[in-house]
Image: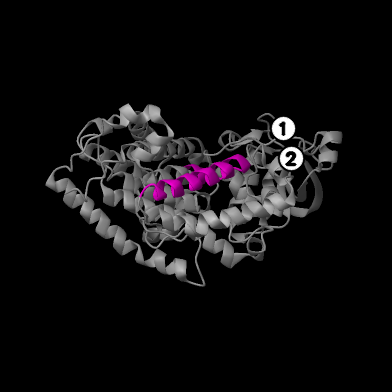
Amino acid sequence: MEWFAAGNYDAARFVLQRGIAALYLIAFVAVLRQFVPLLGSYGLLPVPDFLERAGSRAGPTLFRWRYSDRMVVATAWAGIAGSFALVVGLPQQGPPWVPLVTFALLYLLYLSVVNVGQVFYGFGWESLLLEAGFLAAFLGSNDVAPPLLVLLAFRWLLFRVEFGAGMIKMRGDRAWRDLTALYYHHETQPMPGPLSWFFHHLPRPFHRAEVAANHAVQLVVPFALFLPQPIASIAAGLMILTQLWLVASGNFAWLNWLTIVLAFSAVGDDQLVALVPALGPVLDDGSQATGDLWWVILVGVMAAVTVVLAVRPALNLMSANQAMNASYNRWHLGGAYGAFGSITRRREEVVVEGTSDPDGRTGWQEYVFRGKPGPVDRWLRQVAPYHLRLDWGMWFLALGSGAQHRWFTVLLRRLLEADPRTLRLLALDPFEGRRPCWVRARVFRYRYSTWHEWRASGHWWVRTVSGDLAAPLTLTATGE
């Protein structure tokens, strides 16, 4: 059954299994650190309230039968343990069913989290990680060769990510079509990184060339993933280089890193050895075995399911009304992906402040978030692939999404209470754990400073007040 075993892709399997597991590890660390203050029993959007409202519409989740904050913490630790085992390669040393069960456990645990995560888990890369973890379960162990059908399923997933993103850009915003999108993107993206200011100030002709290159990589190159080697490896290499450029220019959680990992599904061992000859002796030891009949049948069933699930996202790619980041089932498999179908031209930020003045007239001090822009002299950090969920929520809040206001009102109350778990989500509590008398939220217009302004002041941003989002509130004036 030479058609079943892809003996020339041991490096691809190595990167896929360990890379996906590493990103699951990061995702479960985020659950451990952020889930309870955001979604716990006393969180901003409590899961028990959500499950009472949503019922079966919430989708498959362990928490349907019972929810507790301790259970979430246990889920996170179980996910961390399973992910770490896969990263160091322990399950891969056994028969194929061992990594299969381990990845299946990670998938089901994280699915349980995503399906109750509400707006804080409403990102396309949550479904992408789930789908990648599901496919990784069928990559086998060191006892068998990587199944070709699984590698093709990974390439189809990568195709949807890249081609879907390219098509949504062309259909969604004129700035992508006239090559001006990057005049604005680095300044207005959700979570700028430490180099985003410098990217923004690159010459405009270079920005236009960036957009043109992006279109080529997302709209043309993905088709080469299904061509013979070395063409498929070259296509994957171009995607990896593009994603590394995006990693350097911003913070998009694990979206770019996961796309890089997926691209290795098209990288053959021979092509990798040609690039890095030192890997030759290591890759020569890969297994060529097909595996037992049960394994072949199981992989075949997975491939058949993938084909059935491919229909709706394929139709979506061809639709003039293409959906971006759409899940067509509650298992988050066979979804549609894409990003930045439209580009924001102006950046507005919600700045939360508090004061200890009983009259609320003076002494206002700013709460500083871990990743989003705040004080104008603060150089932003590289936080990706870690996901700062509250900070991303604040970006959507500044865009005027009404669905966000319910949790934001609760956030203000938690700040007035000086709730320790909520304060740990922030980079700086100006009151050092004490309760403020008042809090408020103002909207500021942000823009990057020019080179001249930066040299003169050391400020990365220039900001002006646009208006109020929440007038000054006291603890007695807030409600949940």
Number of numbered callouts drawn: 2
Image position of 420 with respect to 412: above or below: above
- For disc 2, the marked residue is 354
Q: Main secondary structure of the magenta part?
A: helix
Residue closest to the eye, 250 or 272: 272
Q: Position of residue 310 (x, y in %)?
A: 35, 62
Q: Position of residue 458 (x, y in %)?
A: 81, 33
Q: Quadrant of residue 286?
A: top left
Single out the residue that lies furthest toward the left. Answer: 293
Image position of 81 with respect to 40: above or below: above
Looking at the picture, which amino acid does disc 1 mark? Pro
The residue that appears at 47% across and 50% down in the rendered structure is 125
Q: CA distance from mark 1 to mark 2?
A: 8 Å
Q: Name the secondary structure under disc 1.
A: loop
Any magenta on residue 478? no
Residue closest to the eye, 263 or 224: 224
